[in-house]
Structures are given as C-alpha cells and as structure tokens.
Image: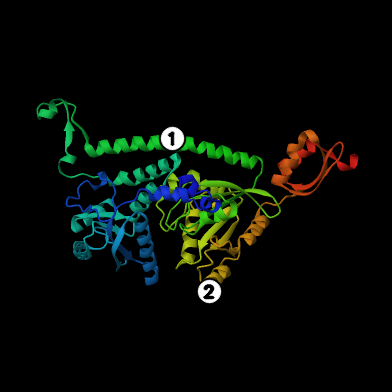
Amino acid sequence: MTRMQKYSTLDQIETGEMDLEERHALRRVAGLSTELQDVTEVEYRQLRLERVVLVGVWTSGTSIDADNSLLELKLLAETAGSEVLEGLIQRRQKPDPATYIGSGKALELRDIVEASGADTVICDGELTPAQLRELEEVVKVKVVDRTMLILDIFAQHAQSREGKAQVELAQLQYLMPRLRGWGGNLSRQVGGRSSNGVGVGGRGPGETKIELDRRRIRERMAKLRRQISGMSTSREVMRHQRQRREVPAVAIAGYTNAGKSSLLNRVTGAGVLVEDALFATLDPTVRKSRTPDGRLFTIADTVGFVRHLPHQLVEAFRSTLEEVADADLILHVVDGSHPDPEGQIAAVREVFATIDGALDVPEVVVINKADAASQDVLDRIQRRERNSIVVSARTGAGIPELLDLIEQQLPRLDHEVRLLVPYERGDLVSRAHEEGEVVSVEHVEEGTILHAWVLGSLFHELERVAKPVERV
C-alpha cells in the first residue's frame, strides 16, 4: 500500500496523520547516555535530554499548585523526548541566588542523580547564568531550566521558514547572557608587539573567544529580525485584504494542548496536525468557514501558551500573535479535563496583556474536552466565565451551538439594501452572499434584485452601481 493510498480517506487527512507520521519518523532514542563528566562550555553543546530529574522550588500557592507545575514540567520534558526518573519539590521563600535550591539540597540532588543514572537536571524556573554554573558544578551533569526546555520543544516542532527563524531568534536571545568559558577559552588573543610582551603602543589585546561569539550572535540576531520582518509582510498583506473586504476574523487562542487544532479541524476541516503533546503545532493556520446562515468568516489557529511562557518567545512570535489582536472575536480554548483550568485561563490572559489591543477584542471561553471533564468542573467554569460554551472537538458535541454563538458575536450587518444590480456586476451579488446575509434574490430582465444585509464597504459600492428597486 502506498503512502497516499494509506491516507486516502478524508477522516485520516483531517487529523493530520501524514504530518504526524513525518514527525515521529525521527525521534530521540532512549538509553543512549549523554552523561557529562566535563560540564564546561555546555552552551556550545547540542541540547540533548534523555534521562532526567525534575526539580522545582515551591515559593507560593498551595502544594497542589506546586504539584501541578511539576506535572506540567514532566509533560514538557516528555514532549522533548526525555524519560523522567525523579521529581523533587523544595519549599522555600525564594530560590537560592547561588544554586537555585541551596547548597545542601544541591548535594542531595547530586546523590539522587548518581543513584538514578540521570544525565540531565531540569529546573522548574528560569535560572540565571550563575545559578546554572554553580548547580552544574555540584551535580556534575547538565542543568536545563524551564525556558531552555520550552525553546528546545519549539525548535523540534517548527516547520515553516518563519517559525524556524522565530525560534532561532528566541534561542539566541536566551543564549546571549549565558555564554561563558573556562580556562584557555577566556584567554585574550593579542597582536602587534604586545604579543611578545615587549614594547608599548601595540594594538593591545584583541577579542576574547566569548566576545567573538557574542558579536557573531548579535549579527545573526539582526539578520533573523530582518528576515522575520520581511516574511511577516505577506501575512500583513493578506490580513489587510481581509480587513478591506470586511471579512470577519476569528482567532483560536489558549493553553497548549487544550485542543485548538482539533477545534479548527472540526469547524473547518483544515486537516492540521493533531497530537496529544504540548506545543504540537506552532505555525499559524488560517481557514475560511461559514456561520449557520452562510456568512463567511476566517478562523486562525495560533501558537499555544503556557505558564511563564519565555518572554523571548513572546517577542519573537509577536508578528504571529498579532492575529489575536486583529481579530473580531477570540475563541479562548480551555482544557476542561485539566487539573487547574482556571490557572490556564489566567496564564493565557497574562500573555494577552502583552499584546497591544488583545484585551479589547470580544472573547468567548470555549471549554473543550467535555467528554473527559467532570460536570462539576464544567459548571464551575461556566459560572465564573459568563460568555462561555462547552464543547468536545473529538466527538463534535457543542460545535453547532458554538457556530451559532460565533454568528451572534461577529460584527453586525448594519446596512439593509434593496437594489437592482446589473448583471455585469454579478461579483457584488457574490460578495453579498459571502460577506453579508442575503434575504432574497430575484432575477429580472434588467438585472438582479438583491435584498440583503451587508457591511459598510459593500453597501457603498452597491450604491454606486445599483439602482433602488422603487425606480424600476
């Protein structure tokens, strides 16, 4: 059976099976040790995560909140291709400025790493360069923080040219302050007579290796910013075309793995990749759809959010996130089966606050995965979020009601027309069907009598070329 025959049915194509198979065709292999005996210059090594120990610092909230945070870190680690061996939480007022968990706990962590055979420690927070260095010197294996882990997942899942450039830019922004070297790597390269240690007035010391690396990174970051700016132009052009034609735009946003891509597939049949993993899809997808009365609108799937989303990613993906601010309606998707759905909602709105204009866009909270959620939880969220609806993208339950709600929330058609449109301008009648709500159409000898509700731009264009029905 050929590859295309295998995926010939519509149902398989709609779930993105071909993209999913391609992603799974190359995976990290567990059991191949990457234990570091020498942890110097770890930034220059490729990030490899296999057998890991998780470490979190509980500074605020309840113990359940701390457990949920570490559970999410476990899912992130598994998405990156790791095998989680242990998970540790320490209660502290604030992280230790030297080793994140304190010198005594760091020694205990070293014993656990040696006993479990782990090759990496992942910390549930963003560590300073000093904390990374000090903790690595104690545990003798590579230490990765939450930000580096998320960036690694993004690097694995980015597919488009723009997405890869955005992720690389975020990685370089993270890496810049964390470059360091030991021993000879910090020695200066000098020139002129100073290289022999004699005389004065020579060129003096040249760049150190770390300075050279920083300069190269700055040059690469500047190049990536120019590329991203150029690639975002096409999206802006398409967005302006939709705005000029006044096609309403709906943006799907929400926590990662809440079911945004599944919802897009269910509403539009887009066929984008669906996987039970965090940050499974990064590249935005825009598709057309229609309300129950036939009105055309666009619906865009955006990148997923997470607690403490690295600010480097927010900055790098700003052009993508602008889809949210430019929308007429936001479908805020929440995983109703998650242990802390309210925390998901708060984390997503925290990211909304960093996007200019996003908080001003009307929002519908779509509580997804109703087939796996507790009814008590669903009722609790609906009492808290007045403008909400319960659906299941997997089973299709609640999707017709969601489309009805979208129709109610979209900008209203405030211009009623009863005009005779010449046959040579049939394109305007077609636009009325696509962008407006057509009440009736009658074909007569002189043209088409159109009775419809339309938006302002189409109304003014119809007025210029059509005649009032009363004059016929």
Q: Is residue 158 left or right of residue 83?
A: right
**343 sits to left or right of 112:** right
- Identity, as a three-letter code, of the amino acid under mark 1: Arg
Badge 1 density bin: few <14, some 14–19, many ≥20, Cα 10 Å: few
Q: Nearer the viewer, residue 460 or 13?
A: 13
Q: Residues within 10 Å of mark 2 (few under 14, many from 20)?
A: few
The residue lying at 72 percent from left, 47 percent from top is 436
Residue 270: give x, y in percent of width and height. 55, 49
Residue 62 visible in this rendered orientation of the protein: no
Q: Nearer the viewer, residue 416 or 443?
A: 443
Q: Secondary structure at mark 1?
A: helix
Residue that mark 2 sits on:
376
Q: Nearer the viewer, residue 59 or 204?
A: 59
Quarter of the image holding residue 183?
Answer: top left
Residue at image mark 1: 226
Disc 1 versus disc 2: nearer the observer: 2
Where is residue 292, by image quadrant? bottom right
| Disc 1 from disc 2: Cα separation | 50 Å
Mark 2 secondary-structure assignment: helix
Q: Identify the image quadrant of residue 106.
A: bottom left
Horizontal and vertical percent position of residue 123: 30, 59
From this view, report whether residue 87 is shown above or below residue 420. Answer: below
Give left or right: position of 387 versus 213: right
Residue in the foreground of this view, choosing between 90 and 410: 410
Which residue sits at x=64%, y=48%? Answer: 297
Q: Quadrant of the C terminus?
A: top right
Is 129 rendered above or below residue 87? above
Residue at 40 percent of width and 57 percent of height: 308
Which label is found at residue 205? none
Q: Identify the mark nearer the N-term, 1 or 2.
A: 1
Three-letter code for the amino acid on which mark 2 is drawn: Asp
